[in-house]
Image (spheres, helix red, strand yellow):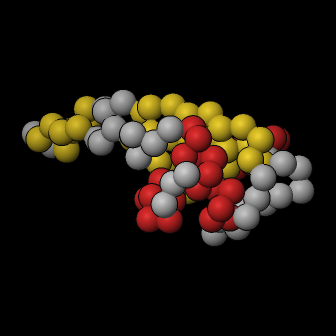
Amino acid sequence: MTDTNRLYTVIQEPLLTEKGTDDRGRRNAYHFRVPIDANKVEIRQAVEKLFNVKVLRVNTLRAQQKVRRRGWTAGLTPAFKKAMVVLKDGDTIEVI
């Protein structure tokens, strides 16, 4: 069982992309940015408790760092973990 503070830190922000919007329409899946150390069980519990929905499946992926240049300066984008959460038919989450 996770504590309430952890639930709020697991779901950092929704990822609003064109592919995510299409995925929401096709299989009722929502994409979220989550901490790298979060596992699928924590993600499922956080979404179910915070949004009061039934989660069918959780898929995760790790987005690696990318090199980006700005003029002469080169840097790295931060690595992050992305969770795709599939909800039961009829359940929705209000994302902006």
- At horizontal 51% and vertical 54% (from top left) the residue drawn is 2
Image height check: is 3 above or below 57?
A: below
Q: Residue at x 83, y 58 (%)?
A: 91
Residue 27 in the image, given as x and y percentages of width and height: 81, 41
Q: Quadrant of residue 16?
A: bottom right
Classify residue 47 as left or right of residue 53: left
Which residue reaches farthest left? 72
Horizontal and vertical percent position of residue 47: 63, 55
Residue 4 visible (yes or no):
yes
Q: Residue at x 31, y 33 (%)?
A: 65
Q: Is residue 18 visible?
A: no
Q: Position of residue 17 (x, y in %)?
A: 59, 49
Residue found at the very far front of the displayed protein: 1
Q: Residue furthest right?
A: 90
Report the number of discs. Answer: 0
Task: Give me the residue at 89% from left, 50% from top.
Answer: 89
User: Residue 68 or 52: which is nearer the viewer?
Assistant: 52
Query: Which corner quadrant of the image does residue 70 belong to?
Result: top left
Q: Say whether residue 9 is left or right of residue 25.
A: left
Height in image: 90 above or below 71? below
State the image coordinates of residue 96 (x, y, percent, origin top left): 63, 69
